[in-house]
Image (cartoon, rainbow, N blue to C red):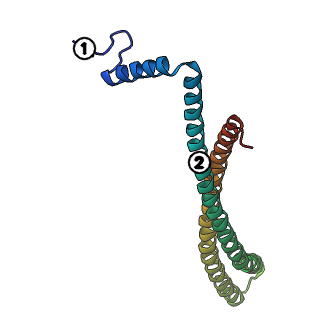
């Protein structure tokens, strides 16, 4: 039967046909024309690949720019949260120091009425501290989420840099082959 797959190379009928067609083309063109045709085909292929790589580089730069703008927004948000957190942390320290002072005073005080007054003052101070802690935890949670987003974007950005470096290297190699500088 005519065009069965070649058992040695496992060619499909289509592959066998294309191989034989290429052999016929080369035989009829002669070596010089075959070389010129193949050179032209390589140049077209390189030009196409260069176009794709340049498009990819443009796309990568756009993605990087978006991450850079996101970083600016997230960093601004981080600064705002830190600025809001600073007075809360300072208030918490003051309250803890006041609470410690009242505990010492309560221990030193012997009179029950004075001790009860100090104890009530200490309870009020503890309530203030708990309130400060609640606010602090809310801001710290927001800060953690913002910093996580910054870290995630940084990882994405670095992957884009790696992709960009590979694409640029390939493009430079193709330009060197094609004589484009």
Query: Label 1 crowding class (10 Å Cα cut-off): few <14, some 14-19, many 20+?
Result: few
13 on left or right of 19: left
Cα distance in 3D space between marks 2 and 1:
42 Å
Q: Position of residue 178 (x, y in %)?
A: 67, 37
- Give SS at disc 1: loop
Q: Nearer the viewer, residue 25 or 94?
A: 25
Q: Nearer the viewer, residue 126 or 55?
A: 55
What residue appears at the point 63 percent right and 74 percent down from the top-left corner?
A: 139
The answer to the question of whether label 2 and label 1 lie on touching residues, with beta carbons closer than 8 A, is no
Q: Quadrant of the N terminus?
A: top left
Q: Position of residue 3 (x, y in %)?
A: 27, 16
User: Which of the labelled discs sits on residue 104, or is there none?
Assistant: none
- Give SS at disc 2: helix
- Quarter-of-image position of residue 18: top left
Q: Position of residue 97 (x, y in %)?
A: 77, 76
- Using the image, determine if residue 69 lies above or below residue 22: below
Q: Residue placed farthest to the top in the image? A: 8
| Total marks placed | 2
User: Which of the labelled discs sits on residue 2, or is there none?
Assistant: 1
What residue appears at the point 60 percent right and 62 percent down from the top-left corner?
A: 149
- Using the image, determine if residue 82 lies above or below residue 176: below
Q: Quadrant of the C terminus?
A: top right
Mark positioned earlier in the residue sequence (2 or 1): 1
Q: Position of residue 140 (x, y in %)?
A: 63, 69
- Quarter-of-image position of residue 115: bottom right
Which of labels 2 and 1 is toward the front? 1
What residue appears at the point 59 percent right and 68 percent down from the top-left corner?
A: 141
93 on left or right of 157: right
Residue bearing the label numbered 2:
51
């Amino acid at each position: 039967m005519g065009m069965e797959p070649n058992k040695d190379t496992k060619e499909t009928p289509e592959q066998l046909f294309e191989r034989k067609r290429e052999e016929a083309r080369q035989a009829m063109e002669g070596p010089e024309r075959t070389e010129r045709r193949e050179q032209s085909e390589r140049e077209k292929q390189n030009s196409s690949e260069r176009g794709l790589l340049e498009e990819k580089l443009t796309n990568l730069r756009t993605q990087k720019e978006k991450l850079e703008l996101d970083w600016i927004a997230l960093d601004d948000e981080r600064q705002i949260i830190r600025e809001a957190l600073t007075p809360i942390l300072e208030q918490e320290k003051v309250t803890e120091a006041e609470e410690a002072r009242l505990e010492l005073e309560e221990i030193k005080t012997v009179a029950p009425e004075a001790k009860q007054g100090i104890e009530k003052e200490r309870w009020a101070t503890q309530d203030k501290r708990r309130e400060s802690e609640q606010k602090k935890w809310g801001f710290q949670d927001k800060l953690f989420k913002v910093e996580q987003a910054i870290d995630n974007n940084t990882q994405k950005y670095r992957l884009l840099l790696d992709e960009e470096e590979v694409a640029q290297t390939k493009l430079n190699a193709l330009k060197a082959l094609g004589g484009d500088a």
